[in-house]
Every structure is written in C-alpha cells, then in structure tokens.
Amino acid sequence: MKRNLIFTLSFIFSFATVSAQVPVRYEPRHKVALENDYVRLMDVRIQPGDTSLFHIHETPSFFIPLSTTFIGSQVKGQGPKESSLSADSTWFNAFESGPLIHRVWNSDTKVLHVIDLELLSPKNSTLPATKELSFLKVDFDNEKLRVYKLAVAPGQDIPLPLLQTPMLFISVAGPPLSIQDPDNRNSPYQVKAGGFQWLGSQKKYQISNGERSAVNGILILMK
C-alpha cells in the first residue's frame, strides 16, 4: 500500500512538472499564425498584468517586438527580472547552449505584442546580390535569413527581387500598405501595422505606400 502511494505521488509530481512547462508553440498566448517548411510564426500577445506559462524555446528563432512595453521574465530556477522591449528591435537566438525555459509577464498598461519566428528549414541557400534592395541596409544576416528594416515613404513603391526562396514582410508601425502579387493584380495584399504577409518564391512583388505617412517594416529573406 505504501509503495503504491509513493508511486502515485511520484507520478503526480512528474506530471505536474511536465505540464508546468510546454513547448512554446503550445503556450496559450503564443498563437501559431503561420507554419510551413520554412517557419513557424507565433503571434504573441500578453495582456497587461498577465503572465505566460513556463515554456520551452529550443528551435533557432528570430524575435520581432511590435510594441514598446515594460515586461518581466523568469528563467526556470532563477529569480525574476524586469526589462523593456522596444518596437522595431529584433534579435536572433539559436539556443545552441540548450533550451530556454522561461515565462514572461506584462508589467505595462498596454498589450505586449511580439512575433516569435521559429526557423524550421534545415536547408540553407546562398542569396544572390539583390540590386532592387541595394539602397537598404542589411540589419541582420546569417545562415538562416537576411533581414532588412525599412521605412516606406508616402507614395513610395519598392519592387522586391525575384528569388528562389520566399520572403516575409512584417509591418511594425504606420498606416496600411499594399503588396502587389503579380498573379493577382486586382487584389493586392493589404498589411496593417502589427500584421504580416508571406511572399512565395519566384515572384516579382511590389510594396506600395499610398498613404500620407511612412510605414516602418521588416523584410525577411529566407535562405
């Protein structure tokens, strides 16, 4: 009887430990908005005063905050820390030293909004020189992706290069803009601030800002 009780308690403890931390894609505030052979894009929104579950990051990821927010975080087994995120700041983490298990909470009065972009493709290609984007500065470049940050001025059109690999556009701030798909010229994609658009390979897209103020965006070229 005593042995059965010990086994039962051990099972309950083990289950509680496992269930208390989940892969990031199963954390309720991390909504999978897009998944394909290249990426798993999670739209992360945490309300003021709310806290995520402990969750596990272990896939190489690129992070894009879409709000400027005071936050707190806690790595499992360590003390809590307070910090802030700025919209348009970005960073890459390959988690080469092992998985990160942590939780995050919103210490601010507005919604915390972040895109967590897991990079799934094991096949990496070499991107050619892209003369269409030569006026833009590369913000980040590694074996997984190349990232540009851009401000699309009112009335400006930006033709995108034709590539063998896809692209992802994320609007950080500003009015809606349109992205012309050459296969569907009558219905361009409309991308609002905080939104994104996946752009398939081997197509000549064009970004256009028909509004009266600039749009800050991030263009990611997959490898």
Image (cartoon, rainbow, N blue to C red):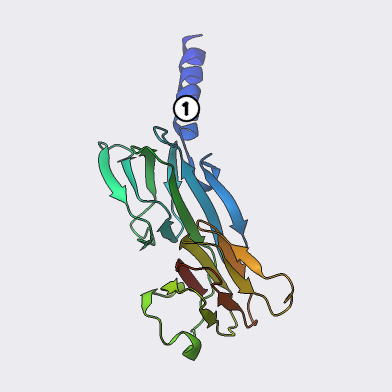
Q: Position of residue 197 (x, y in %)?
A: 59, 65
Local secondary structure at mark 1? helix
Q: Position of residue 130 (x, y in %)?
A: 48, 88
| Left/right of residue 35 with respect to residue 88 in the rendered view | right
Q: Which residue is mark 1?
A: 16
Farthest top residue? 1
Given residues 105 and 218, the one toward you in this image is 218
Tell me where residue 92 sits by quadrant. bottom left
Given residues 92 and 174, the one toward you in this image is 174
Q: Position of residue 136 (x, y in %)?
A: 40, 81
* Point 49% across, 84% down: residue: 127
* Point 49% across, 13% down: residue: 5
- Against 100, residue 22 (above or below) is above
| Left/right of residue 57 with respect to residue 158 in the rendered view | left
Q: Position of residue 13 (x, y in %)?
A: 45, 24
* Point 73% across, 78% down: residue: 183
Tell me where residue 107 sits by quadrant. top left
Label 1 is placed on what type of residue? Answer: Ala
- Against 30, residue 190 (above or below) is below
